[in-house]
Image (tube, rainbow, N blue to C red):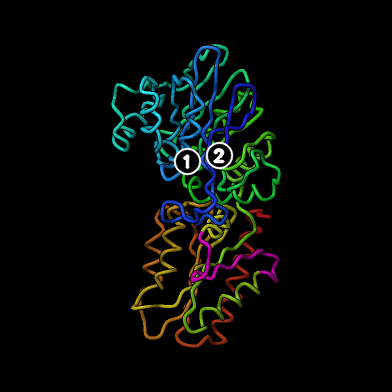
Amino acid sequence: MLKRELKENIYWMGAIDWDRRLFDSLIPLPDGTTYNAYLVEGSEKTALLDTVDPPMADAWAALLEGIPKLDFIVSHHAEQDHSGSIPLVLRKFPEAKVVVSPKAKPMLIDLLKIPESAFVTMADGATLSLGDKTLRFLHTPWVHWPETMVTYLEEDRILFSCDFFGSHIATADLYVNDEGRVYEAAKRYFAEIMMPFRNVIEKNLEKLAPYDIQMIAPSHGQIHDRPEWIMNAYREWVSGPPRNLVVLPFVSMHGSTRQMVDYLASALIGKGVRVELFNLPVTDIGKLAMALVDAATVVVGTPTVLAGPHPLAAYATFLANALRPRVQFLSIIGSYGWGGKTVETLAGMIPNLKVEVLEPILAKGLVSQSHIEALERMADTIARKHKEKGFV
């Protein structure tokens, strides 16, 4: 790993994790990730903004050898992938102060056992002078933990944005050069960790509006040297209306549920409604989360297993409830052999979703003509409701 210059006396000092394929033992990383740390050398003081995930620390530590003096370590976020190597840095630079938001200080004491005397807390909007460079700290709670903050480098108009505007991509490219690829990765990133806090993130976007941001340097992924497009994407994901889209996560054990899913999907497409199917046993859960960003309707397809929904269907429902997408309508289709409480169980798992529940359709045994007719009516209802809402 090499130190790479962004602007005069401002450097990327991160690590590229080419091999990582799972984050938090939950989130798939099909393209790996980066842990972006940055060094800002002022005429009087030097600051390191964030560190790297501890598994990368040994290789990353070589970059610290080239720093003669370090005055400040800025922690934007207390999680390991951002702050986990702060103790290593403090061992090399014991006089350095750890700059944090007030809420981050007790977290880092608990998580990393950093002594209380090492901290300097920064109020929202407070500044720290490095001589000819000024760091302004802006609290951005729930992007995506309550203690998160970002740093605006006033003279160079760079926003060091922590998880805000980030993406999980392992690449040697320092800057975004393929907006299509980064858009998809950034949308996945937003869906998986930020969508539940959409309303607060909207306020944080408004907080950034007065600043002339010419570059965004996130903690994961590539640097945005043309930042307007990613900021516009966030505005759409946060406050735009749902799309004319039905998301259909499903499981089928013996074919009946799959038959219902396929018929409903075909009927919806025929009525001008977009559909995305997710066969849960083989689904990348990140792809499902991305689709939920835009979905107006979710229909869960599940057989009945031991009197309740298939565990994968329950997991998808739990995930949707946790992510709190802008979904307006929800229903359940599926099959059963002798009985059960599939509908009641799934309905009880969505307290966070303010949705209209459409009449479920459950087939006992094989799918009959009456079920096909009911699915046709469901497709009619969904298409009509999407049109009435103006979803496009």
Q: Residue at x 66, y 59 (%)?
A: 387
Residue 171 coordinates in the image, percent (x, y): 61, 46
Residue 352 coordinates in the image, percent (x, y): 42, 52
Residue 327 coordinates in the image, percent (x, y): 53, 55
> Helix, strand or loop at disc 2?
loop
Residue 267 part of the magenta-drawn span: no
Q: Which amino acid, mark 2? A: Met
Count of number-bearing discs: 2
344 to 70, vertically: above or below: below
Q: Residue at x 55, y 12 (%)?
A: 43
353 or 117: which is nearer to us? 117
The residue under label 2 is: 1
Residue 115 coordinates in the image, percent (x, y): 28, 27
351 to 4, vertically: above or below: below
Kindly report the distance in space between the C-alpha atoms of the residues bearing marks 1 and 2: 8 Å
Q: Which amino acid, mark 1? A: Ala
Q: Is residue 36 left or right of residue 233?
A: left
The residue under label 1 is: 59
Q: Quadrant of residue 385?
A: bottom right
Answer whether labels 1 and 2 touch (C-beta < 8 Å): yes
Q: Which residues are magenta?
A: 269-285
Looking at the rendered image, the quarter that the C terminus falls into is bottom right
356 or 134: which is nearer to us? 134
Residue 273 part of the magenta-drawn span: yes
259 to 97, vertically: above or below: below
28 or 68: which is nearer to us? 68
Q: Is residue 106 left or right of residue 188?
A: left
Q: Residue at x 51, y 47 (%)?
A: 195
351 to 299, vertically: above or below: above
